[in-house]
Image: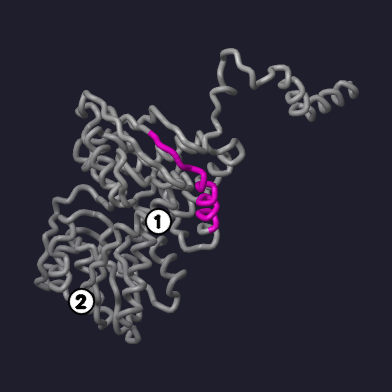
């Protein structure tokens, strides 16, 4: 262990990482640099975090503002693929991990560290996501995962550990739920959710109002989409991060974006969580609506395949792989024609597209009308159907000959 002189820790300011700093110094006799990623988790979580890290024993604390980059370079590309894990989860935690890991590696290389450290438990997906990114970006750096090494197995033990060393902490035994927040979403796990027969209570939801308590008057929002990206809301040009935060506020007010799921973790167990992704839900609905107008049948089917594959790659922590980047590139290529305007109605937990148009639309009222038209000859369908069903016709004829 003596070959490790300096470690960069992914620091959140919570109980786990506060205990990790002195634990690293005691068990590895090394300097600990705290790295904090601002991915939009909120000012409350970041307030005083540098002071907390230094008070815990860190020699330095770096806070990196990653909000704009995360939305523009990780969330927007993922949206183009249509990635949605197991049909419902918009990958809020998963999409934040690669940029945090990348920035942590950059910090480690800049300060000349020998190792990287994270506070992920041995039961979760995040340990895989972080360490897979580390392996892809800086395989020469060693990785320390305290939860796989130490004997501190409870919240009480961690609090006692800090108290014995007279290290201040704002954590307490009262914490019931485990939460993870960023600009894209907030997740809630634990507490009553550990029993799948328990319905979520009001403490399981943080951002969004109860749909039943949402305004009785619906609200419509116009989104402008260019090449698969939301570039303006209600006619006002916005950066990806600005658009997301604006839509988060609007969606939360109407109770949009709540899901309660039991998902398959990468490590083999199932877990239950309540996820809130208000702005992301609105964006996803808008992009898919423009796709309906613009993409032909085969292209749409291919995009759906890309989304399914991308959802597993992102969830499993394989962002920095050739396959994942190839899928993202393919989705970006398809999105070059995905431009248009969409109007979304927000009402009682629902985000419903009510209007959509695009200069690239393949929809033609002249062809689709049920009324009389001069552009489509119904008799042409007979020849198409005979050719389309030719293999079935030949197979049936062969079967009849063999009887």
By secondary structure, the bulk of the magenta-drawn segment is best described as: helix
Image disc number at residue 74 = 1
Q: Quadrant of residue 33?
A: bottom left
Residue 239 magenta-drawn? Answer: no
Q: Residue furthest front?
A: 374
**What residue is at 58 percent from the left and 41 percent from the top?**
299
User: Residue 128 at x, y = what percent?
Assistant: 41, 61
**What residue is at 18 percent from the left and 57 percent from the top?**
45
**What residue is at 41 percent from the left and 69 percent from the top?**
134
Image disc number at residue 60 = 2
286 or 59, nearer to the observer: 286
User: Residue 364 at x, y = what percent?
Assistant: 55, 27
312 or 382, nearer to the observer: 382
User: Residue 290 at x, y = what percent?
Assistant: 46, 37
Vertical relation: 344 (above or below) 245? above
Vertical relation: 33 (above or below) 16? below
Asked whether residue 274 appears in the rendered view, the answer is: no
């Amino acid at each position: 262990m003596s070959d490790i002189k300096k470690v960069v820790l992914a620091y959140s300011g919570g109980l786990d990482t506060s205990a990790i700093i002195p634990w690293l110094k005691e068990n590895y006799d090394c300097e600990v640099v705290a790295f904090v990623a601002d991915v939009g988790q909120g000012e409350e979580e970041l307030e005083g975090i540098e002071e907390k890290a230094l008070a815990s024993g860190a020699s330095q604390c770096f806070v990196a503002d990653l909000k704009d980059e995360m939305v523009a370079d990780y969330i927007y590309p993922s949206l183009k693929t249509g990635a949605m894990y197991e049909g419902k989860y918009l990958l809020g935690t998963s999409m934040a991990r690669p940029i945090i890991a990348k920035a942590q590696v950059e910090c480690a290389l800049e300060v000349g560290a020998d190792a990287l450290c994270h506070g992920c438990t041995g039961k979760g997906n995040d340990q895989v996501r972080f360490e897979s990114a580390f392996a892809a970006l800086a395989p020469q750096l060693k990785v320390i995962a305290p939860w796989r090494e130490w004997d501190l197995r409870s919240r009480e033990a961690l609090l006692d550990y800090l108290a014995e060393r007279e290290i201040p902490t704002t954590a307490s035994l009262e914490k019931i739920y485990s939460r993870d927040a960023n600009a894209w979403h907030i997740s809630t796990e634990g507490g009553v959710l550990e029993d799948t027969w328990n319905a979520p209570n009001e403490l399981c939801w943080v951002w969004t109002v109860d749909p039943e308590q949402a305004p009785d008057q619906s609200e419509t929002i116009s989104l402008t989409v260019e090449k698969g990206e939301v570039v303006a809301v209600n006619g006002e040009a916005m950066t990806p991060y600005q658009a997301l935060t604006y839509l988060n506020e609007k969606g939360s007010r109407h109770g949009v974006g709540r899901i309660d799921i039991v998902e398959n973790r990468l490590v083999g167990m199932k877990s239950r969580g309540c996820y809130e992704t208000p702005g992301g839900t609105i964006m996803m609905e808008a992009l898919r609506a423009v796709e309906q107008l613009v993409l032909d049948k085969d292209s749409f089917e291919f995009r759906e395949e890309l989304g399914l594959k991308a959802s597993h790659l992102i969830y499993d922590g394989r962002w920095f792989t050739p396959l994942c980047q190839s899928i993202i590139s393919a989705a970006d290529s398809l999105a070059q024609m995905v431009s248009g305007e969409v109007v979304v109605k927000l009402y009682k937990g629902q985000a419903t597209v009510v209007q959509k148009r695009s200069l690239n639309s393949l929809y033609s009222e002249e062809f689709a009308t049920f009324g009389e038209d001069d552009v489509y000859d119904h008799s042409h369908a007979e020849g198409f159907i005979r050719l389309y069903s030719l293999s079935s016709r030949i197979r049936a004829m062969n079967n009849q000959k063999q009887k």
